[in-house]
Amino acid sequence: MAFGTKDLAPSELDGFDDEKLVAELEKSKKELFNLRFQSATGQLESHGRLKAVRRDIARIYTILRERELGIRTAPSVSE
């Protein structure tokens, strides 16, 4: 099983549109900043969370890049 958060599995991220992926990316970057700050001040309780958030960020960047190159397609809007 991959590290990271359950709701950010690659199969789950495939269902997100580009705007939602960018929003998740922003959220993950803010969380990473806070975790690094906690680590620097000695308040971090779960060091494994740093690794998981970094992997989530990399996973989002990968999906965005694959969509840009046409390797992966964005979900179609069905209304």
Image: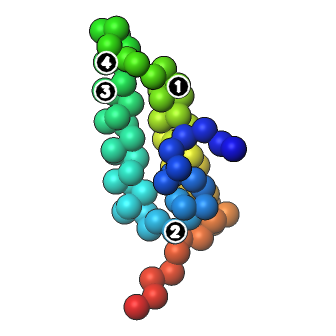
- Return the disc, 2 or 4, that comes first in the chain's sequence: 2
Badge 3 amino acid: Asn
What is the C-alpha distance between the residues marked 2 and 1?
A: 26 Å
Left or right: residue 7 compared with residue 23: right
* Comes first in the chain, label 4 or label 1: 4
Q: Residue furthest front?
A: 45
Q: Which residue is mark 2?
A: 15
The alpha-carbon separation of the residues under discs 3 and 2 comes to 27 Å
Asked if disc 2 and disc 1 are in contact, CB closer than 8 Å, the reply is: no
Amino acid bearing label 4 = Phe
Asked whether the beta carbons under mark 3 and mark 1 sit within 8 Å of each other, the answer is no
Within the image, what quadrant is residue 67 found in? bottom right
Camera-near label (2 vs 1) is: 1
Q: Position of residue 7 (x, y in %)?
A: 49, 54
Q: Residue furthest bottom?
A: 79
**Element marked by disc 1:** helix
Q: Residues within 10 Å of mark 1 (few under 14, many from 20)?
A: few
Mark 3–mark 4 Cα distance, whole angstroms, equals: 5 Å
Q: Which residue is mark 4?
A: 37
- Residue that badge 3 annotates: 34
Measure the alpha-carbon separation of dots 2 and 4. 32 Å
Which label sits in the foreground, 3 or 1?
Answer: 1
| Residue 15 visible at all | yes
Q: Position of residue 36 (x, y in %)?
A: 37, 20
Residue under the image location 52 percent in, 68 percent down:
15
Asked whether residue 65 appears in the rendered view, the answer is no
